[in-house]
Image: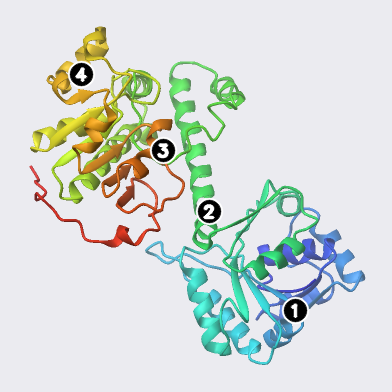
Amino acid sequence: MNVSIFGLGYVGCVGAACAAKLGHHVIGNDISENKVKLISEGRPTIIEAQIDELMREGHEKGLIEATTDSRFAVLHSDLSFIVVGTPSTKEGHLNLSYVFNVAREIGEALRDKESFHAVAIRSTVLPGTNKEVGRIIAEASGKRVGEDFAVVSNPEFLREGTAVEDYLHPPLTLIGTDSAKAEEMFREFYREIPGEFISTDIEVAEIMKYVNNTYHALKIVFGNEIGNICKALDIDSHKVMDIFCRDTQLNISPYYFKPGFAYGGSCLPKDSKALRTLAHDHYIDAPVINAIDPSNQMQKKNALEIIESKGLSKIGILGLAFKAGTDDLRCSPIVDVAEELLGKGYEIRIYDRNVRVSQLTGTNADFISAKLPHLHEIITDDLDEVAGSSDVLVITNREPEFEEIPARYPHKVIIDLVRQYRSLDYDGHYEGISWKNINENPAQDEEIRHDRQRTDF
């Protein structure tokens, strides 16, 4: 394929060399005449492992050229990659002026092009940038986004020192697009790249680089805090973290990475508190570990605020135990929410077929008697009784029987804390605690008739 790369800095230079390695013809573009001269001579603009050889090979095969003429680059390519810098402002925002300037240049060049053109944003940008780039190109070109051209989000995940290997052997290749034609072009461009090719929503692709890098930063800080605690206890922290990383079933796995409700149970609250106390007793500052519980409490507050925002007084809670398939109520986060709602005068009914109040014993019984002393009056194993008498249904556990809630109980307000559904066409209102609306039914946008005002204490 014929591709143009706008920006011949670190990412652009690696992209040019690797694209040529894959057999594509590359036209590099930059406002820097020195960078253009280097690429035109088959020399890289950066220092990076393997880059000299790849650049030289691409140049010798006639697969790499460079120019300061953006119009030439667009008219002689099918794909354009935007890989210019997005420096941070003093306030932490991104300076996107370079991206928008290139978009305008591409748009102006597209005025004279008849064939479909795809533009990939490779630079690290915030959600919403793709849409603005599309608007700028459409305005400058007089052409229609999605029909005459498409803007694709294609974030890079390259590490300095291993950038060539990361490009040619990634764990996955990600694009965000709503254009089937553009997706087909990018599948062809990355055809020789191993790993899964993922095409997803534009906004999902735009935010992924930030999610990845923030998590990488979190891992480093978490490892350092564990190391500091271990040092104070004369424990080999590297042995600890080596064993930690060997557990790929829970520790290094997708198991806990599901946005939803707060955690509960007997282990996570108790053990994380014990580790915080251990650090405190040895005068070790552990701000990340100390922030875990406040963040968990915040998610309970978020759930409470969503429930109150509906303005309805009859609340049905589906699932009281801290997770599905158990009767363990210890530190169950929905218990705290139910306690708050009762204190504010809401009418609460609870369904949980696993919980038998008369059979609760030990710390389980002590916990619930302190939080919900009259639980036996509001809990039942009759789902119809709870759902039928409630205006708001709060799903707190992912139970198979809750899949039929929208069909069996129409017109209710459903608040989903566990992502029970992937998508919905439900004639009532639906809201998830940590994800955008998934209900496509027009009834979703109808006004809710409130029967109470929110009360703040």
- Mark number for residue 77? 1
Q: Nearer the viewer, mark 1 or mark 3?
A: 3
Which label's residue is closer to the chain start, 4 or 1?
A: 1
- Mark number for residue 403? 3
**Element type at marker 2?**
helix
The percent position of residue 92, horizontal first and vertical second, equals: 40, 61
**Does the rendering let one see residue 404?**
yes
Residue depicted at 33% across the width and 23% down the height: 269
156 vs 208, left or right, is: right
Q: Are marks 2 and 3 in contact (CB under 8 Å)?
A: no
Which label's residue is closer to the chain start, 1 or 3?
A: 1
Local packing at callout 2 (Cα closer than 10 Å; few below 14, some 14-19, many 20+) is: some
Which label's residue is closer to the chain start, 2 or 3?
A: 2
**Mark 4 residue type:** Ile
Q: Nearer the viewer, mark 4 or mark 2?
A: 4
> How far is disc 4 from disc 1 in space, using C-alphas?
67 Å
Q: From the viewer's perspective, is residue 142 above or below residue 272?
A: below
The percent position of residue 329, horizontal first and vertical second, equals: 28, 20
Point out the residue furthest to the right here.
Answer: 60
The percent position of residue 199, horizontal first and vertical second, equals: 62, 57
**Element type at marker 3?**
helix
> How far is disc 1 from disc 2 in space, using C-alphas?
27 Å
> How far is disc 2 from disc 3 in space, using C-alphas?
30 Å
Q: Nearer the viewer, mark 4 or mark 1?
A: 4
Which label's residue is closer to the chain start, 1 or 2?
A: 1
**Mark 3 residue type:** Glu
**Residue where numbered disc 4 is placed:** 368
**Mark 1 residue type:** Ser
**Residue where numbered disc 2 is placed:** 208
> How far is disc 1 from disc 3 in space, using C-alphas?
49 Å
Q: From the viewer's perspective, is residue 226 above or below residue 368?
A: below
